[in-house]
Image: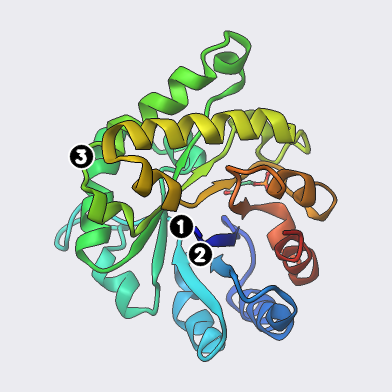
Amino acid sequence: MRKKIVAGNWKMNTTVAEGVALAKAVVELAGQTPDNVGLIVAPPFTHLCCVADVLKGSKVELSAQNCADHESGAYTGEVAVNMLASAGCQWTILGHSERRQYYGETDEKLVEKVRLALAGGLKVILCVGENLDQREAGKHFDVVSEQTKNVLFNFTAEDMKSIVIAYEPVWAIGTGKTATAQQAEEIHACIRKVIAEKFGEAVAEDLTILYGGSCKPSNAKELFAEKDIDGGLIGGAALKADSFIEIAKSF
Ligand code: 13P
């Protein structure tokens, strides 16, 4: 059985004190979630050490929202994988659409980042997803397949054990407009097929694929009921511990 995960991407929200309080509240409620559902929070870089302390001994794991595409050195403003690991991260999100859209993140750069993350012992949540124009042009399957192939076909079946994919249609992020369960399911099934073609059925069956984009307590149940949707990458609704936990109870 592949792992179910609900991950909260806090994006550029909360002060350190607010983030610590949010993490404490998540830890307090984490016991209400099923044992087989993994919980991850991804605060901003500045919060990682403090939040790591809060999470100690709980089931909640820690993720960064990005990492540098170099190991170390003269890259002002960047944060390297070994720094994240030493701050207590087990995970990093990579390729979020906001990074692709506003910070010029390319698939080529992502190959390097995934390589460094895995080499440094971090697990990866790799985000893929089409924008509104691409969906309206009927290109969503192609766009998501290409993003998946361009990055992940550079890795091995063994590497895939440390990788989770998050399908986040850009038009559904922060817009209140969720993909229907059927729209999400058909893309998730497509991603799993792409992975199966390269790495075989067993690897594809084991791969956790999350949905992200206006996922909230009121729609999580329907989304998570789909056979290829293994959880969620949550933005806005992860900024409140009770709604984040409610989502994790939706399986
Ligand atoms: P929202 O849940 O706020 O739409 O954000 C989704 C997302 O981008 C998570 O990474």
Q: Nearer the viewer, mark 2 or mark 3?
A: 3
Mark yes or no: residue 179 visible.
Answer: no
> Residue 101 placed where, x, y %?
47, 32
Q: Residue at x 27, y 59 (%)?
A: 117
> Vertical placement of 197 versus 212: above or below?
above
Between 138 and 113, which is closer to the camera in this rendering?
138
The residue carrying pointer 3 sits among few (fewer than 14), some (14 to 19) or many (20 or more) residues within 10 Å by Cα, namely: few
Residue at the spot of label 3:
154
> Callout 3: helix, strand or loop?
loop
Q: State if disc 2 and disc 1 touch (CB < 8 Å).
A: yes
Q: CA distance from mark 1 to mark 2?
A: 7 Å
Q: Residue at x 53, y 80 (%)?
A: 51
Q: Residue at x 63, y 78 (%)?
A: 23
Q: Nearer the viewer, mark 3 or mark 1?
A: 3
> Residue 74 placed where, x, y %?
15, 58
> Residue 139 placed where, x, y %?
51, 13
Q: Residue at x 72, y 59 (%)?
A: 251
Residue 18 quadrant = bottom right
> Callout 1: helix, strand or loop?
loop
Q: Label 2 sits on what residue type? A: Pro
Residue at the spot of label 2:
44
